[in-house]
Image (spheres, rainbow, N blue to C red):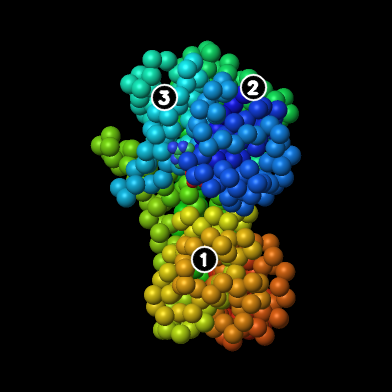
Amino acid sequence: MKLGVIGTGHVGLVVAAALAELGHEVHCTDANTELLNNLEKGILPFFEPGLKELFERNRKRIHCHSNIQAVVSPSTALFLAVGTPETTEGTSNLDALWKALQEVCATASEKKHLILKSTVPAGTAHRAKNLIKEHSQIAHSIISNPEFLRQGEAIEDFLRPDRIVVGHSTLEEREVMEKIYEPLLKNSSPKILFMDNVSAELVKYSANSFLALKISFINEMALLCERLGANIEQVREGLTSDHRINPHFFTPGLGYGGSCFPKDVRALTETAKDLGFDLFTIESAEKVNNRQKDLFFEKIKTQLGSLNKKRIGVWGLSYKPGTDDLRRAPSVEILQKLYSEGAQVQAYDPVAMENAKQALKDQFTPCESKEAACEGADALLIFTEWPEFHTLQLEQLKTLMRGNLIVDGRNLFDVQKMKSLGFNYLSVGRVSSLKI
Ligand SMILES: NC(=O)c1ccc[n+]([C@@H]2O[C@H](COP(=O)([O-])OP(=O)(O)OC[C@H]3O[C@@H](n4cnc5c(N)ncnc54)[C@H](O)[C@@H]3O)[C@@H](O)[C@H]2O)c1
């Protein structure tokens, strides 16, 4: 099939490359022309494992255009994957979506199937249909097809999903979606779930909110463990040995970040508020998540006292491994606080350094290696569980640092081993020398 993708960011570019992998001819565009020019040269705008290879392999079936007409004209169906960022009130900013839809309406000379890939609040498909009526004589169809990929595992998630959710209202729309995903359905066996548009929109928000809730729950139990002298790893094992409690997204740490969970959790609570009620559980998940960063910062302060002129090493900046994305990464907020209190931060991340330089400017010193980030440090902070952080000999770490404090937001190391090596090692929810 000939398909269009509007918005080639973290989702749209993966969708474009994966649809090409499935054998479709893909035409894509983005409002950012520099991004498109770079794509033409094979330069991808962000790091995603395997994406460059997938993109290159299918290059002959992927066409990038700065002119939307060149995308709309040949395509039977178009995926809209533009950003839907959070407004200051916590709702979703749909300006980019409305703009893209209007551009399609102004350009299309025949009926198109418009597939909402962006995460959009319940009721958006309905509003989109109204917008089409206002801006076009043609009754384009609106299909909701929320995306569940995880950055860092995006290709695998797209090509081997647990389920594909499709919100639609006609048999024709159902058949179009079956045809698009047919090669994928042949190779793997995800469920394809057909439902009405509003239900499909809600699946996406409730899935992210539920996962956020799980993360916040285990973090709250971790805090209890710290106060009671219990061990969250043992508590977690006790919990997840119950087949009703799935271990995924149930690991204690610095809380959730990234471009999706924080904004989607807020947007869902705002949707309920608009309807006149509160989503108490989900609001609590957000509160716990915010507190998680405060607790981490408190641990540093309790141990070091004044941060003025303290040299702080940092391992990992991205909100999770496998991505260079710093959007809503706990590291950014905490590094800004450290800077404002006079600390001298030296940080290393295997892939997120360029984004960190843009986000944090001169608030930290970028380092070329994990070893360099520890040199002469009074304390080491661990924000991201990149595999390479396991490979440094802990004895070497000891000699590189000036102090012995390690505050680990990802529970990378064994508590007893760290203690025996003479580190003042504070992790999340595990017995340590810390008394708060
Ligand atoms: N990042 C994720 O892991 C993820 C996962 C599932 C769903 N989503 C959702 O997918 C959507 C896109 O997220 P993302 O992370 O890819 O965002 P992104 O910011 O990485 O990419 C969005 C792209 O859309 C482009 N754009 C904006 N307005 C445009 C317009 N009018 N026409 C053409 N292009 C336009 C931007 O230039 C940008 O390149 C959001 O709704 C997000 O919530 C994201």
Distance from disc 2 to disc 1, alpha carbons, whole Å, reads 41 Å
Residue 56 horizontal/vertical position (percent): 71, 42
Please name the residue that numbered disc 3 is placed on. Answer: 106
Residue at x-position 67% and y-position 50%: 49
Classify residue 105 as left or right of residue 379.
left
Name the residue at 37% across, 55% down. 287
> Which one is nearer the viewer's eye here, 265 or 9?
9
**How far apart are the two marked residues, 2 and 3, measured between alpha carbons?**
23 Å
Q: Is residue 158 above or below residue 265?
A: above
Which one is closest to the eye, mark 2 or mark 3? 3
Left/right of residue 126 with respect to residue 348 in the rendered view: left
Q: Position of residue 60 (x, y in %)?
A: 71, 34
Above or below, comparing residue 104 to residue 248 in the picture: above
Residue at the spot of label 2:
1
Disc 1 or disc 3, which is closer to the eye? 3
Query: Toward the viewer: 17 or 184?
Result: 17
Q: Residues within 10 Å of mark 3 (few under 14, many from 20)?
A: some
| Other residues around mark 2 within 10 Å, as few (<14) / some (14–19) / many (≥20) | some
Residue 207 position, x and y percent, is: 49, 39
Three-letter code for the amino acid on which mark 1 is drawn = Lys
- SS state under label 3: helix
Circles 2 and 1, Cβ within 8 Å, touching? The answer is no
Which element type, helix, strand or loop, lies under badge 1? helix
Residue 383, given in percent of the width and then of the height, sits at 55, 65
Please give the residue where the numbered disc 1 appears in the rendered image: 357
Viewer-nearest residue: 45 or 41: 41
Please report the residue visible at 53 percent of the width from the left and 75 percent of the height from the top. 365
Q: Residue type at mark 2: give it.
A: Met
Question: Callout 1: 10 Å neighbours few (<14), some, many (20+)?
Answer: some
Decide which of tag 1 and tag 3 comes sooner along the chain: 3
Which quarter of the picture shows residue 134?
top left
Outermost residue toward the top?
171
